Image: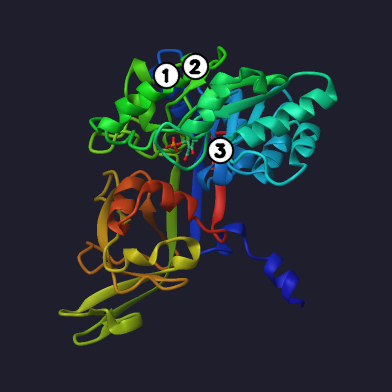
């Protein structure tokens, strides 16, 4: 029997060490939650980086179903993916602008819209509009304090003085991006707000959008005509330090491959980073840094194991510590204190219902954004609630 037909006999759940469940109903609920937070202000969906690792081909249509009509991505390639899976009426904007000489023709042909970040990009889009003999829609990004993308102050002044540069550009949205939205008291929030208002007054009348996920929770001043959240849609807390108003969308579980009992002074994993001080039961789980389970979680993270309750009772999830280093395909858990040893072939939770994504991110010394966008390709992915 060939290896291929052997493999074909494995059931999908037997093919991977990790199970990633994406709850599309929770994603849609988060979209609606943001609409409510904005008191009805239209809400775009930022679905760059493959919808923050969740899979844009599934997430974007779910967001469309929930009411999203405007989508932002970082790259033209990501925009092309959206064009395949979204209805033609969806507006798809590329935050990164026009990539390379002549790209504007390809954007037009593909039905994707640039976010124009400089006078040079405005000139190229305007030239294409002139050649086509019609106005072409685009968004315009002004920098108000992030110093990454968008018209810098001197270019904004030149555009304000020479608004004819926008001839043929149908500026659908004027946008800017907050640097410190997740720190509501940071003075830069108000400074950026003032700078954005001022820019808006100097330019021809355009609808405007400033707020990302945390910015959507900064109150009415920051809403303008469109919220532009990404992370909050996917369950990242947009109000750090306060309870998470968003539903958890992603659940990551790992399969227990082996369980062993070790005695002191035995060690676990690379670098002998964990040494048993007592008789210790170790469960080895089949995912690691190759799956985006960050190596900085070595000796830091926790997993949650379901423990059956007594007769008739509900099972509960109990936290167990990660011990030793995260390796490429494996992590090791100290399950000694559980009332019963978890079974080989069973699953533990790494984040999801028990442990918030942001807690895991804290343990890794990073942010939920990085955990999600690092999620690996090897997981068995299951989409629920479509
Ligand atoms: C210009 C712009 N708008 C909106 C977003 C969405 O931000 P968040 O994921 O914090 O909601 C991003 C993400 O980095 C962005 O670069």
Left or right: residue 163 versus residue 370 is: right
Query: Mark 2–mark 1 contact, CB under 8 Å?
Result: yes
In the image, farthest residue toward the right: 132
Residue 335 percent location from the top left of the image: 26, 67
Which of 267/300 is in front?
300
| Secondary structure found at label 2 | helix
Ranked by sequence position, the earlier of labels 3 and 1 is: 3
Measure how far apart labels 2 and 3 are at the Cα level: 30 Å
Ligand 1 closer than 8 Å to label 2 CB: no
The residue where tag 3 is placed is 47
Residue 42 visible to the viewer:
no
Q: Which residue is mark 1?
A: 198
* Sequence-first disc among 2 and 3: 3
Residue 202 numbered mark, or none: 2
**What element does badge 1 sit on?**
helix
Gap in angstroms between the C-alphas marked 3 and 1: 29 Å
Q: Is residue 341 visible?
A: yes
Dot 3 falls on a residue whose secondary structure is: loop
Q: How did the renderer colour the structure?
A: rainbow
User: What is the total number of numbered labels drawn onto the structure image?
Assistant: 3
Viewer-nearest of discs 2 and 3: 2
The image shows residue 293, relative to residue 67, as above or below, that is: below
Label 2 packing within 10 angstroms: few (<14), some (14-19), many (20+): some
Indicate the quadrant containing the N terminus: top left, top right, bottom left or bottom right.
Answer: bottom right
Residue located at (30% from left, 57% from top): 365
- The picture quadrant where one finds residue 107 is top right
Q: Residue furthest left?
A: 277
Reply above or below: 68 against 300.
Answer: above
């Amino acid at each position: 029997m060939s290896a291929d037909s052997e493999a074909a006999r494995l059931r999908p759940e037997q093919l991977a060490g990790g199970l990633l469940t994406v709850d599309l109903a929770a994603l849609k609920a988060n979209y609606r939650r943001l609409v409510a937070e904005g008191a009805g202000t239209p809400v775009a969906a930022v679905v760059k980086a493959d919808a923050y690792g969740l899979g844009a081909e599934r997430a974007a249509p779910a967001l469309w179903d929930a009411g999203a009509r405007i989508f932002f991505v970082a790259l033209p390639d990501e925009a092309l993916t959206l064009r395949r899976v979204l209805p033609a009426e969806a507006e798809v904007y590329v935050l990164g602008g026009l990539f390379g000489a002549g790209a504007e023709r390809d954007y037009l042909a593909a039905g994707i819209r640039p976010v124009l970040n400089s006078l040079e990009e405005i000139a190229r889009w305007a030239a294409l509009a002139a050649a086509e003999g019609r106005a072409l829609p685009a968004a315009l990004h002004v920098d108000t304090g992030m110093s990454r993308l968008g018209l810098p102050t001197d270019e904004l002044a030149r555009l304000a003085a020479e608004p004819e540069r926008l001839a043929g550009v149908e500026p659908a949205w004027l946008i800017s991006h907050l640097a410190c939205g997740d720190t509501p008291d940071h003075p830069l929030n108000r400074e950026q707000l003032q700078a954005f208002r001022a820019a808006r007054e100097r330019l021809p009348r355009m609808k405007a959008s400033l707020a990302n996920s945390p910015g959507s929770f900064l109150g009415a001043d920051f809403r303008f005509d469109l919220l532009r959240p990404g992370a909050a849609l996917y369950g990242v807390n947009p109000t750090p330090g306060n309870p998470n108003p968003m539903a958890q969308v992603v659940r990551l579980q790992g399969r227990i491959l082996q369980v062993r009992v070790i005695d002191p002074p035995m060690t676990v994993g690379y670098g002998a980073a964990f040494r048993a001080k007592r008789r210790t039961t170790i469960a080895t789980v089949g995912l690691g840094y190759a799956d985006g389970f960050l190596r900085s979680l070595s000796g830091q993270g926790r997993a949650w194991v379901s423990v059956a309750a007594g007769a008739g009772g509900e099972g509960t999830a109990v936290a167990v510590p990660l011990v030793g280093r995260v390796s490429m395909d494996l992590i090791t858990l100290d399950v000694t204190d559980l009332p019963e040893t978890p079974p080989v072939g069973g699953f533990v939770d790494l984040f999801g219902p028990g442990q918030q994504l942001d807690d895991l991110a804290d343990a890794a010394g990073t942010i939920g954004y990085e955990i999600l966008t690092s999620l690996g390709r090897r997981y068995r992915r299951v989409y629920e609630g479509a």
